[in-house]
Image (cartoon, grey):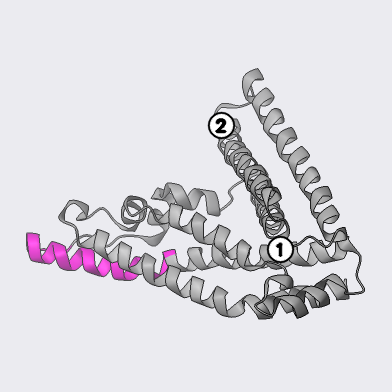
Amino acid sequence: MKQIFSLAGWNWRMARRSYAILCGAFALEQLAVLLWQASRGAMLGMGLAACYEEGFQFQVFLLVFLLAGLLAGPAVNDRKRARCSYTWLTLPMPPAARLAAQVLTAAVLQLGVAALQLVLYMVYFFPVQAMDSARAMEKLGTAMPAQNLYEQVLLSDSMYWLLPRRPAQFALLVVTLLASALLLTCVRLHRGWRRGAAVVIGAVCGVCCLLLFQWELDFALFGAYDALVHNTLLAAVVLAALTVFSIWWALRAIRRAEPA
């Protein structure tokens, strides 16, 4: 375990500058988009949740979430390619430990982006509310009724997926985090046509995770019925099979010294 954490720390040190730039750009972009949405006449009185959805910020969050996982690529992807490649590939560690270190780094970076999104949503509630009130005073001559942050969280369809309400939903969030960290690591490990295949596998697994989230909600709302149970089991089997195959393929690439 000590070796795994040491390699994960090495990857973190290599990625921290790019990660800080990515998170900073994300925070500034989201603030600019939310304020622009709040300044639109059609959004008067709509609140933070509507501005967030109309600005497609959840889609931007998903993009940043994936990019954060890619930043946690192997140390072999450093600029000093030859020296780092030699060092990483000749560490006195089994391939499984090297893969675990890469996945751990990716998971931590992605979890940081998810936490950042939740913090930004709460922080940006106040400037959006202030702009909304200022525009109401300008257009209507009266201030808008004070909004409630808790209500804006509940009204946001996107925040539903980031704040688990049931044990099954929490389990799906953990599975999605770990699976995405693994599959993004595999994308960085392979090269050539193998990298393209890893991207396709990641896309299929991403669709499976989205379907499982939606069907978990259907279970909570409508209960279990045959078609829903069948579809859920099928998606879970596909996700599990592709994940196991990705682990085997990544370990094989490490053994063959193929990381790119």
Q: Amino acid at mark 1?
A: Ala
Which residue is depicted at the point 62% across and 42% down?
Answer: 209
Q: Is residue 90 above or below residue 205?
A: below
**Which percent across, then down, holds residue 245?**
79, 43
Q: Main secondary structure of the magenta part?
A: helix
Q: Is residue 135 magenta?
A: yes
Which of the 4 image quarters holds residue 178?
bottom right
Residue placed under numbered mark 1 in the picture: 260
**Where, quadrant-wise, is the C terminus in this rendering?**
bottom right
Q: Is residue 2 magenta?
A: no
The mark that comes first in sequence, 2 or 1, is: 2
Residue placed under numbered mark 2 in the picture: 218
Q: Nearer the viewer, mark 2 or mark 1?
A: 1
**Which percent across, then down, holds residue 37?**
26, 59
Is residue 110 in sight in this rendering? Answer: no
The alpha-carbon separation of the residues under discs 2 and 1 comes to 41 Å
- Residue 115, numbered label: none
Question: Which range of residues does the magenta coloring cover?
Answer: 121-143
SS at badge 2: helix
Q: Is residue 226 above or below residue 153?
A: above
Which residue is depicted at the point 56% across and 62% down?
Answer: 67
Determine whether label 2 and label 1 are within 8 Å by CB: no
